[in-house]
Image (spheres, grey):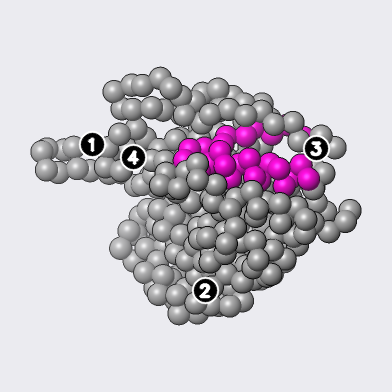
């Protein structure tokens, strides 16, 4: 079956890791017609460069996108293109599987957890203003609709993938109205899934618990800001953002992306690691129903990491981007 997929290569090392990932998918026999387009417009406003509406239209048309990393200015400049794409396309569920890769050094073994993050509201609504000089107000938006929707996504995912336990992460001891609404909404969903154990943890306690004993967690369900923080924290348990995938899923579209940085210091030098984008493309193949091919690429990737002869420098190996991609291709099991 042929698929039409929007490819947003990204910035910095993005085009390099996107090209390597695309080459591996083609070698695995996936039939994809790529529509490649930049995620950022070249038009400049007083707030900087903004999301390319042609990219938005392409994803809406194709319903699936693969996206490389894109930079976001700090303390000024344009709004985040990454956030703008997710909000504009209503990709309300951010899915981050976190699992050890063989051969990647980490503080813990046997980590296998799923982070489900609400992706459209909370403090990331971007509603902030200067009240008076020296005083800035940011609005935290939590709605019953979005909280219920992400809760249902998490429980349906857990049921579909035979996950046994969900922890809802919150700060409702302090933010009793906003995080309280999130919890009440999720509890109502949890009551419809009695086969899945439901627990709650305050976010600061959850951060401590996950670095003490990550194996106690199965699925973590979080509002936007806590989910952003804890998903990166969890990635650090298994080697960092370079070895974990990410998916942004809505009712009509899905975008699969590497969430590490653009690494401009090594862009164009040929030794960027495409693992995160490749793992995200495996999630994309599952989404497209190409599960057999997804497993073949997964097996090949794990074999390359287990042998550690052709891994990239960031994980202690000697290889460049192209050598790593060719090693994964050579390790693909026969159809």
Magenta residues span: 3-27
- Residue at image location 11% in from the left, 43% down from the top: 134
Query: Residue extending furthest right?
Result: 335
x then y, percent, for residue 25? 74, 45
For disc 2, the neighbor class at 10 Å (few under 14, some 14 to 19, many from 20) is some
**Gap between marks 4 and 2, in whole Å?**
30 Å
Q: CA distance from mark 2 to mark 3?
A: 36 Å
For disc 2, the marked residue is: 106
N-terminal-most mark, 1 or 3: 3
Q: In the structure shown, which secondary structural element does the residue marked by tag 2 occupy? A: loop
- Position of residue 207 relative to residue 295, above or below, is below
Q: Position of residue 255 (x, y in %)?
A: 60, 41
Q: Is residue 281 left or right of residue 201?
A: right
Query: On the image, which quarter does residue 71 sit in?
Result: top left
According to the image, label 1 marks what residue?
129
Question: CB atoms at circles 2 and 1 under 8 Å apart?
Answer: no
Which numbered disc, 4 or 1, marks the residue that appears first in the sequence? Answer: 4
Q: Specify whether 31 is left or right of 211.
A: right
Residue 128 percent coordinates (x, y): 27, 39
The verdict on residue 289 being magenta is: no
Q: Which residue is mark 4?
A: 73
Q: Residue furthest bottom?
A: 212
x%, y% of residue 90?
54, 37
Q: Are marks 4 and 3 in contact (CB under 8 Å)?
A: no
What residue sits right under mark 3 in the picture?
31
């Amino acid at each position: 079956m042929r698929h039409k997929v929007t490819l947003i290569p990204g910035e910095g090392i993005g085009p390099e890791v996107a090209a390597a990932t695309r080459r591996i998918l083609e070698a695995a026999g996936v039939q994809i017609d790529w529509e490649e387009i930049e995620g950022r417009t070249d038009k400049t406003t007083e707030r900087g460069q903004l999301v390319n509406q042609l990219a938005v239209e392409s994803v809406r048309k194709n319903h699936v996108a693969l996206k490389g990393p894109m930079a976001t200015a700090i303390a000024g400049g344009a709004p985040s293109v990454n956030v703008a794409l997710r909000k504009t396309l209503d990709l309300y569920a951010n899915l981050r599987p976190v699992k050890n890769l063989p051969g990647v050094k980490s503080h813990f073994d046997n980590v296998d957890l799923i982070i489900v993050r609400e992706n459209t509201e909370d403090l990331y609504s971007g509603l902030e203003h200067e009240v008076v000089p020296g005083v800035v107000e940011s609005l935290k938006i939590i709605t019953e609709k979005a909280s219920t929707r992400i809760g249902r996504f998490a429980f349906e995912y857990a049921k579909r993938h035979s996950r046994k336990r969900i922890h809802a992460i919150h700060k409702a001891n302090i933010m009793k109205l906003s995080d309280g609404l999130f919890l009440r909404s999720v509890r109502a969903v949890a009551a419809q899934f009695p086969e899945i154990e439901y627990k709650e943890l305050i976010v600061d306690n959850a951060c401590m618990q996950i670095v003490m004993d990550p194996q106690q967690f199965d699925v973590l369900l979080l509002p936007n800001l806590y989910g952003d923080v804890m998903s990166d924290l969890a990635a650090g348990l298994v080697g960092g953002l370079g070895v974990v995938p990410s998916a942004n899923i809505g009712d009509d579209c899905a975008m699969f992306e590497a969430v590490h940085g653009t690494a401009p210091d090594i862009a164009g030098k040929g030794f960027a690691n495409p693992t995160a984008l490749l793992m995200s493309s495996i999630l994309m193949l599952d989404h497209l129903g190409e599960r057999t091919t997804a497993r073949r690429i997964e097996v090949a990737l794990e074999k390359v990491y287990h042998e550690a002869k052709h891994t990239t420098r960031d994980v202690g190996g000697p290889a460049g981007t192209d050598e790593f991609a060719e090693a994964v291709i050579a390790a693909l099991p026969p159809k």
